[in-house]
Amino acid sequence: MTVKTVISSKTILITGATSGIGLALFNHYSTQGYYKVIACGRDAKKLALLSNRAYKTCLFDLNDADDIKQQLADIDDIDIVILNAGDCRYIDDAKHFDGQLFSDIISTNLSSLGWLLQYTLPKIKKGGQLVFVSSSATILPFPRSEAYGASKAGMDYLANSLRLDLLKENIDVTLVHPGFVKTPLTDKNDFTMPFLITSDEAAKRIISGVEKRKKYLHFPKRLTLLLKFFSLLPSSLWQAIIAKRDKT
Ligand SMILES: NC(=O)c1ccc[n+]([C@@H]2O[C@H](COP(=O)([O-])OP(=O)(O)OC[C@H]3O[C@@H](n4cnc5c(N)ncnc54)[C@H](OP(=O)(O)O)[C@@H]3O)[C@@H](O)[C@H]2O)c1
């Protein structure tokens, strides 16, 4: 862990700061001169590249509760925590369900949040903010997304429930539903991703929403509003659309 002294008024912790959306958030906040940015990642080499601009770097795998505890131990007060790190893997053969894959994704994307909250929430100041980067995949069920979708749906419930309990602590919770964002995570996808946006665009939407203390963010709206519209229709219609797509 590296520590630097800077005069700044807000401390912000970002998980998954080494790639994609998290890196774009890090790049923005760390160049403002106003934020002390704590960058979290699991890849020592990638994290080292951020150390010049980071207030601190914390190296841990989301699946290692002891490492999370140890790396976050000497952090003092935090203003904003952005829980962004996550992974996506698909269930390719539902009939021969991959239990290990399911367990791994739930552990990385959902169970880890319990540890991150245990070790960061007591340090979030009154008036602070907690941000969950979930996914627009929770608006509608998508094929092959049993593991990823379930992990993010769990995150949604966690965020919405926690918001109620943190009212008395004066800590605001923002839940983010991004659509498709071009990052190493989606570069692996073998299907067309409609309305794909850059990680910079995604970061700008998140930063603006966090500044406004929004409870809920979803973007790009041309995708998320379409998904919301379909979610209001009978599920048989969505099923028919997916079945037709699978035939072509
Ligand atoms: N891209 C999209 O279209 C999209 C859409 C909706 C939601 N999201 C969500 O946005 C978040 C960021 O995704 P992204 O697209 O920016 O992906 P990304 O480029 O792959 O970045 C993911 C980040 O999470 C870290 N991470 C992954 N598994 C980890 C683990 N086990 N322990 C510690 N860190 C781990 C990665 O670390 P390494 O650098 O070491 O890999 C990386 O910093 C994720 O929660 C994702 O589900 C993305």
Image (tube, rainbow, N blue to C red):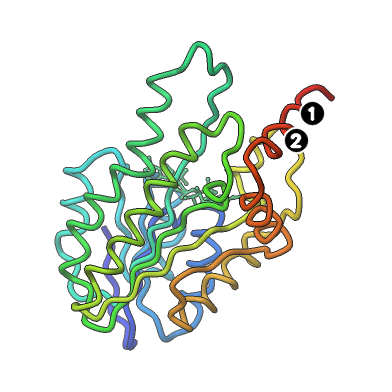
Tell me how many marks there are.
2
* Mark 2 vs ligand 1: CB below 8 Å: no
Image spot of residue 107 (x, y percent): 32, 36
Q: In the displayed structure, would residue 88 be above or below residue 69?
A: above
Disc number for residue 244: 1
Q: Is 225 left or right of 62, judged from the image as shown?
A: right
State how far apart marks 2 and 1 are (Cα). 5 Å
Q: Is 1 left or right of 206, judged from the image as shown?
A: left
Residue located 78% across and 30% down the image: 245
Q: Nearer the viewer, residue 50 or 136?
A: 136
* Mark 1 vs ligand 1: CB below 8 Å: no
User: Residue at label 2?
Assistant: 241
**Callout 2 environment at 10 Å: few (<14), some (14 to 19), or many (20+)?**
few
Disc number for residue 232: none
Image spot of residue 167 (x, y percent): 25, 76
Marks 2/1 in contact by CB < 8 Å: the verdict is yes
User: What's under tag 1, amino acid-wise?
Assistant: Lys
Image spot of residue 108 (x, y percent): 36, 40
User: What's under tag 2, amino acid-wise?
Assistant: Ile
Q: Quadrant of residue 93?
A: top right
